[in-house]
Amino acid sequence: MATEAYTEVEATFDGTPIPDVFALTLHNPDSDDPHGALTTHQPLPEGARGPLIVTGRRDGKRWQVMLSEIEVYRSTAVGCEFTIFGPARRRELPTSAP
């Protein structure tokens, strides 16, 4: 199983910011069964469906991850899990100088 984890995350769902996101985890993002999870104190509700855009860090680099459509299938007090429809698009962003 291929897994990607992003930290220091800023996220929007259907154009609305999601506060307090700690991590985005993608499981098998380039397979026929992609799914993922957001770790946050403000999870999306079960059944929510729409685009998710995340900016976060992975392997010391900043990335933007664009998921054109997700559907939340489980929501808990510490996050939510979702199915991904369509490709996971990623682009590396410039890193600010220290």
Image: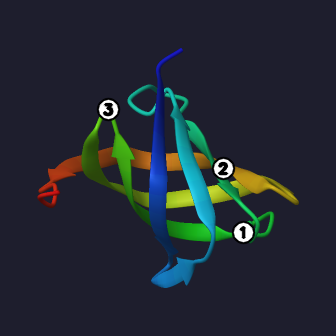
Render colour scheme = rainbow
Return the residue at label 2: 82
Residue 59 badge: 3
Query: 67 left or right of 81?
Result: left
Q: Residue furthest right?
A: 77
Q: Nearer the viewer, residue 8 or 4?
A: 8
Q: Residue furthest top?
A: 1
The residue at the point 57 percent across, 50 percent down is 23
- Whether 53 is drawn above or below 24: the answer is below
Hey, what amino acid is under mark 2?
Answer: Phe
Do the residues under discs 1 and 2 have CB atoms within 8 angstroms? yes
Q: Indicate the secondary structure of the residue bearing disc 1.
A: loop
**Quadrant containing the C terminus in the rendered view:** bottom left
Q: Indicate the secondary structure of the residue bearing disc 2.
A: strand
Query: 53 left or right of 3?
Result: left
Q: Nearer the viewer, residue 69 or 16?
A: 16
The residue at the point 70 percent across, 69 percent down is 48
Give the x, y percent position of residue 68: 40, 61
CA–CA distance in space, label 1 to label 2: 10 Å
Give the x, y percent position of residue 26: 52, 37
- Whether 14 is drawn above or below 5: the answer is below
Return the residue at label 1: 44
Query: 3 left or right of 94?
Result: right
CA–CA distance in space, label 2 to label 3: 23 Å
